[in-house]
Image (cartoon, rainbow, N blue to C red):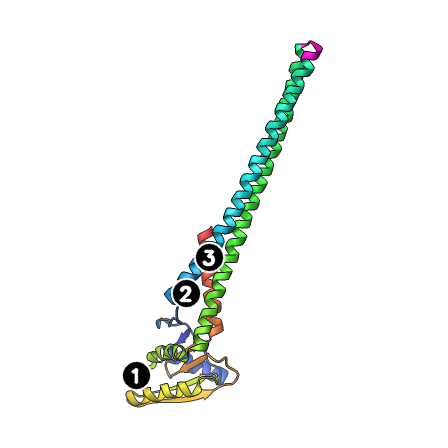
Amino acid sequence: MQWSNSPLLKQQSVKEAGSARSIMTDTTPAVKYPDMTDHQSEVLRRTRELEQMRHLEQMEALKEQLINDAKAQATQIREEAQQAGYSAGQEAGYQQGYQEGLAAAQADAAALLSQAEVAVKAATAEVNLFRQDKQQDMVQYGVSIAEALIEQRFTENQEAYLGFAESVLRQFEQPDIFITVRCGTTHVEALRELLDNKKETIAHFRYVLLPDAQMAPFDFHIESDHALAVFELDKEISRFRQKVMEREGTYND
């Protein structure tokens, strides 16, 4: 939601751009679009938690299996090499043969353990990368659900849309005021009825309602001599997505 309530800036922008409107951010309290219900929020939260738990469990199991396999293989090779070195030394009757065989076995085992350590580190890095990727996927999934719920609420429930529009109109409730309302063609009559009710309850409240086929169904602009409020649903949803992604990025740092 964008606001501008400086008459000097509004007059200057009208002189310079004709019918173009200057929109400036002001300290007028931002109007929030409808939130998800508690039940919808709980469903979204549980869905995200279950997906994250399932993928993390799979990756942790894979990591543990890699570590165990590497250790078992290293132990087996070391024991076999030690036995081979001992047998070779005993058969030749020389202690030197035994020592050389044992040294070779220990070297082979050390090399294998080193390789296993590298493999474990690589597996751990892969698990962490997978976890980060899935975290981003879950955030995207959650945001998509929230966006769908917001749009569905406006689409299927005209009262929700009108309630939001009325909350914006309250910023313009003052005697002897003239406002211009531009909106999409979907809710023209409902908005007209809402404005007529304001006209009956507020002294010298006047308005003009201008349907605009180029505007999206839920978008509207309300302008007086001192302020301008612009609501565009797609832009509000985009800002919502950006804020959620920024917040999740901060949590993961």
What kind of secondary structure does the magenta stretch mostly adopt?
helix
Nearest to N terminus: mark 2 or mark 1? 2
Residue 5: x percent and y percent?
Answer: 37, 77
Residue 29: x percent and y percent?
Answer: 35, 71
Q: CA distance from mark 2 to mark 1?
A: 37 Å
Left/right of residue 24 with respect to residue 133 in the rendered view? left
Mark 2 vs mark 1, foreground winner is: 2
The answer to which quarter of the image holds residue 221 is bottom left
Residue 225: x percent and y percent?
Answer: 37, 84
Nearest to N terminus: mark 1 or mark 3? 3
Q: Check disc 2 and report the residue beneath it.
A: 40
Number of numbered discs on residues = 3
Residue depicted at x 39% and y 68%: 35
Nearest to N terminus: mark 2 or mark 3? 2
**What segment carries the magenta color?**
90-94
Front residue of this view, candidates 120 and 200: 120
Secondary structure found at label 3? helix
In this picture, is 236 found above or below 89? below
Q: Is residue 201 visible?
A: yes
Q: Check disc 1 and report the residue beneath it.
A: 174
The quarter of the image holding the N terminus is bottom left
Front residue of this view, candidates 149 and 239: 149
Residue 55: x percent and y percent?
Answer: 52, 50
Q: Check disc 3 and report the residue beneath it.
A: 48
Residue depicted at x 50% and y 57%: 138
